[in-house]
């Protein structure tokens, strides 16, 4: 059994004091970050890379510098801001949580696991990340970087998903009483700079003498990959970009539940798995205008790919006076999800 946890902790803290990444939700000089910054960044980082989040985070804080300010905003506003990050349920949950914290916790991010875990969109990992990084509490949230370092240190030759409980136990060996925030972040940074997913930099790694994978020359094989069994489903739709004489695009809001809830869309047919089952959208059936094909486009969601045939048409505004329109010049900054913006890009 591996016996050098204390040395690993010591090394990582020392390494971090020199090599910490400069991320906008962190404070300089290794002081504790603002818990509100950690709270926002953890929502953003769920399923999105650090590099993508970095720029968006700065804009977010400029717009909503405090939890109190965030809690006052509306769902359409945050959805519009979120465009480009994807997984819009995170934005909705972040706002719901901010409103709960505003109402029940006087704008202070809760400092207990039991309170955090009840907030929308916060699971075990995010609760621990907020407690550990934002409040220096003694916990170990296991993100992909930390899990990878652990399976390599202990040469665990099973896919990570199969050893989650074991990793939780091993993670406990690395919980710090005094320096939890820095230790957690040091693990994360070490995984993204040295113990990389592919080609880890073992030759310059300061803990290679404690690493069982390195000793056994297994560092390229561990973590073991899960064999992929599933092929992504394909769904089909047709989308209609209808423009009036004032250069406005016909739009509507999506239902307030389900995928891309409450976001703007151009009319499109119900998404189906069998192309033959496509039926023309009811709004388009009413328009009776000549439609021009603009080709097809494929967009990849996490669980399926969406194949869309795009059509373009013109119509007089008076014919659809009760419908919603947005200016052609402003759709790119509207609360349309990326897939819809790309459809419009292609059509016009
Ligand atoms: S020796 Fe290599 S595999 Fe082991 S912890 Fe260091 S970088 Fe990671």
Image (cartoon, rainbow, N blue to C red):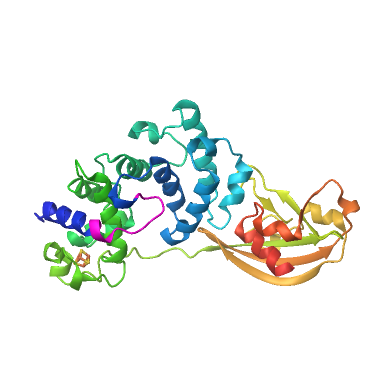
Residue 86, picture quadrant: bottom right
Q: Nearer the viewer, residue 102 or 224?
A: 102
Give the magenta part as a residue range: 16-27
Question: Left of 54 or right of it: where is 223?
Answer: left
Residue at image x 18%, y 73%?
203
- Asked if residue 17 is among those painted magenta in the image, a careful observer would answer yes
Q: Is residue 189 depicted above or below 114 in this figure?
A: below
Residue 244 location, x and y as percent?
Answer: 84, 59
**Could you say where residue 111 lies in the image, as x and y percent from the top left?**
34, 33
User: Between 54 and 88, which is closer to the camera in this rendering?
Assistant: 54
Asked whether residue 324 is in view, the answer is yes
Rendered location of residue 28, percent (x, y): 33, 52
Residue 327: image quadrant is bottom right
Quadrant placement of the C terminus: bottom right
Tell me the quarter of the picture where residue 133 sits: top left
**Can residue 268 be found in the magenta stretch?**
no
Q: Residue at 62% of width from left, 50% of height from top? A: 80
Q: Nearer the viewer, residue 63 or 307?
A: 63
Quadrant into which the N terminus falls? bottom left
Image x and y of residue 101, in percent: 46, 32
Q: Main secondary structure of the magenta part?
A: loop
Q: Give the residue drawn at x 78%, y 66%.
A: 312
254 vs 311: above or below:
above
The structure residue drawn at horizontal position 67% and vertical position 48%, both measured from the top left corner, is 254
Indicate the quadrant of ligand 1 in the picture: bottom left
**Can see residue 260?**
no
């Amino acid at each position: 059994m591996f016996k050098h946890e204390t040395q690993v902790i010591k090394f990582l803290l020392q390494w971090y004091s020199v090599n910490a990444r400069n991320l906008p939700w962190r404070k300089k000089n290794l002081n504790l970050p603002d818990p509100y910054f950690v709270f926002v960044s953890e929502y953003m980082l769920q399923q999105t890379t650090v590099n993508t989040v970095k720029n968006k985070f700065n804009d977010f804080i400029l717009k909503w510098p405090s939890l109190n300010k965030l809690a006052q905003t509306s769902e359409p506003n945050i959805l519009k801001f979120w465009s480009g990050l994807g997984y819009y349920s995170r934005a909705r949950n972040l706002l719901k949580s901010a409103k709960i914290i505003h109402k029940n916790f006087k704008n202070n991010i809760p400092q207990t696991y039991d309170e955090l875990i009840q907030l929308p969109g916060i699971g075990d990992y995010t609760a621990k990340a907020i407690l550990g990084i934002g409040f220096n509490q003694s916990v170990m949230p296991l993100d992909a970087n930390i899990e990878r370092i652990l399976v390599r240190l202990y040469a665990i030759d099973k896919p990570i998903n199969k050893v989650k409980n074991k990793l939780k136990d091993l993670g406990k060996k690395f919980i710090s009483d005094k320096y939890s925030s820095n230790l957690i972040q040091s693990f994360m940074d070490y995984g993204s700079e040295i113990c990389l997913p592919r080609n880890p930099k073992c030759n310059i790694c300061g803990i290679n003498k404690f690493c069982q994978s390195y000793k056994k020359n297994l560092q390229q094989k561990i973590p073991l990959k899960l064999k992929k069994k599933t092929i992504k489903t394909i769904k089909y739709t047709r989308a209609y970009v209808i423009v009036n004489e004032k250069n406005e695009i016909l739009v509507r809001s999506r239902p307030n539940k389900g995928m891309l809830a409450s976001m703007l869309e151009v009319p499109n047919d119900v998404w189906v798995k069998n192309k033959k089952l496509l039926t023309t959208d009811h709004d388009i059936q009413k328009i009776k205008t000549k439609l021009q094909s603009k080709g097809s486009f494929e967009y990849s969601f996490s669980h399926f790919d969406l194949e869309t045939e795009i059509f373009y048409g013109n119509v007089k505004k008076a014919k659809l006076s009760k419908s919603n329109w947005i200016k052609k010049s402003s759709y790119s900054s509207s609360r349309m999800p990326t897939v819809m913006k790309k459809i419009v890009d292609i059509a016009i």
